[in-house]
C-alpha cells in the first residue's frame, strides 16, 4: 500500500500551536502528531494536560499513535515538513497490523516500522537540533537500531523563537503606563477594551512574545485600580 492523508491546516502564524494550558503545572499545551494507520492519516493535536493525561483505548492498544512534537514547532511549515517525511510515515503504516490478543484488538508494528516510528519521534521532539541516523543492515535484512551511527544530519521539525507569556506577567510592571497611554477608565467600553488588548498583543508579538488573556486582565484592572 502507499499514500497517506495529511489533515494539517495551512497555518499563517508560526506560533499558532503555542497555546496556554489551564493546568498550573504546565507552561503550555502539548503538541502531538496523530498517526492513524488504518485510515493512513496524519493530523496535529494540541492538548491540555487534563486531556493528554487520559489515554483513549485506541492509543492504549496501539491502534493509533500520538507522537510528541517540539512545542516551538513552526506551524506554517509543519505540513510541508510532514509531506517531506511522508515516506517515513508510510513505512509505519505499511508495517502496522491489528490482531486479536484474546482480550482486545491490538496494534503491532514490524521491526522496520518500529524503527521508522522511533526515527520520526526523534525528529519531532528535538526539532532541528537532533542529529538523526541512517539505518544500517545487510542486504535483505531488516535494519537495526543504531543510534550511535550518525552518518548524516536530517532536518527535524522547523521551530520558531516566540515565547508564551500571560498578560499578568507581561503587563503587571507597567499597569499605570498602560492605563494612562490608552486612556482607560471605568467608563471604557468592551469594544475599546478589546481593541486595546489586540494592540498590546501586537506590540508584544513584535518583541517575540505571544501574550494570552490580555482582555481579561485589562477588565480585572477595573476591580483593583482606583481611577
Image (tube, rainbow, N blue to C red):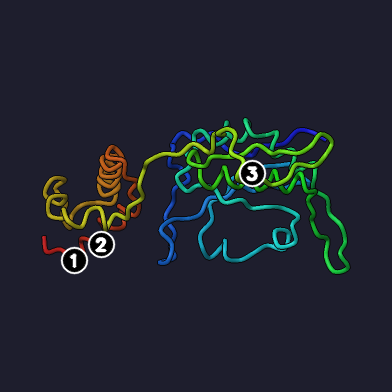
Q: Are marks 3 and 1 in contact (CB under 8 Å)?
A: no
Q: Are marks 3 and 2 in contact (CB under 8 Å)?
A: no
Q: Is residue 158 above or below residue 183?
A: above
Q: Can you give x and y, in whole percent of width and height, for residue 74 in the image?
A: 47, 38
Earlier sequence position, callout 3 versus callout 2: 3
* Residue at screen point 68% across, 52% down: 65
Depth check, front residue: 199 or 204: 204
- Name the image quarter holding the C terminus: bottom left
Give the distance between the C-alpha atoms of the residues marked 3 and 2, in whole angstroms: 47 Å
Give the distance between the C-alpha atoms of the residues marked 3 and 1, in whole angstroms: 52 Å
Q: Quadrant of residue 27?
A: bottom left
**From the viewer's perspective, is 87 left or right of 74?**
right
Q: Is residue 28 above or below residue 74?
A: below
Q: Residues within 10 Å of mark 3 (few under 14, many from 20)?
A: some
- Name the image quarter holding the N terminus: top right
Q: Are marks 1 and 2 in contact (CB under 8 Å)?
A: yes
Q: Look at mark 1 in the image and give the residue it sits on.
A: 224
Q: Look at mark 3 in the image and give the residue it sits on.
A: 119
Q: Look at mark 2 in the image and give the residue it sits on.
A: 220
Q: Quadrant of residue 55?
A: bottom right
The secondary element bearing badge 2 is classed as helix
Q: Can you give x and y, in whole percent of width and height, for residue 176 in the image?
A: 12, 54
Q: Can you give x and y, in whole percent of width and height, for residue 218 in the image?
A: 25, 55
* Residue at screen point 16% across, 50% down: 178
**Tag on residue 199?**
none
Q: Residues within 10 Å of mark 1 (few under 14, many from 20)?
A: few
The secondary element bearing badge 1 is classed as helix
The secondary element bearing badge 3 is classed as helix
Q: Can you give x and y, in whole percent of width and height, for residue 133 in the image?
A: 61, 39
Give the distance between the C-alpha atoms of the residues marked 1 and 2, in whole angstroms: 7 Å
The nearer-to-camera label among 3 and 2 is 3
* Residue at screen point 83% across, 50% down: 97
Amino acid at each position: 500500500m502507499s499514500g497517506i492523508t495529511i489533515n494539517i491546516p495551512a497555518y499563517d502564524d508560526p506560533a499558532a500551536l503555542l497555546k496556554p494550558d489551564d493546568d498550573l503545572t504546565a507552561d503550555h499545551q502539548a503538541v502531538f502528531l496523530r498517526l492513524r494507520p488504518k485510515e493512513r492519516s496524519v493530523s496535529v493535536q494540541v492538548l491540555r494536560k487534563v486531556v493528554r493525561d487520559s489515554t483513549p483505548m485506541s492509543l492504549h492498544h496501539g491502534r493509533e499513535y500520538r507522537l510528541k512534537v517540539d512545542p516551538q514547532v513552526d506551524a506554517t511549515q509543519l505540513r510541508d515538513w510532514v509531506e517531506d517525511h511522508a515516506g517515513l510515515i508510510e513505512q509505519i503504516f505499511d508495517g502496522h497490523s491489528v490482531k486479536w490478543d484474546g482480550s482486545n484488538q491490538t496494534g503491532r508494528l514490524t521491526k522496520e516500522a518500529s524503527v521508522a516510528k522511533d526515527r520520526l519521534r526523534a525528529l519531532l521532539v528535538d526539532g532541528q537540533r537532533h542529529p538523526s541516523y541512517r539505518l544500517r543492515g545487510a542486504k535483505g535484512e531488516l535494519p537495526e537500531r543504531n543510534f550511535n551511527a550518525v552518518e548524516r544530519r536530517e532536518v527535524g521539525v522547523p521551530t520558531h523563537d516566540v515565547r508564551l507569556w500571560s498578560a499578568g506577567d507581561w503587563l503587571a510592571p507597567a499597569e499605570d503606563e498602560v492605563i494612562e497611554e490608552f486612556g482607560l477608565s471605568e467608563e471604557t467600553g468592551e469594544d475599546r477594551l478589546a481593541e486595546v488588548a489586540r494592540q498590546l498583543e501586537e506590540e508584544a508579538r513584535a518583541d517575540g512574545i505571544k501574550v494570552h488573556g490580555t482582555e481579561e486582565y485589562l477588565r480585572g484592572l477595573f476591580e483593583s485600580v482606583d481611577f
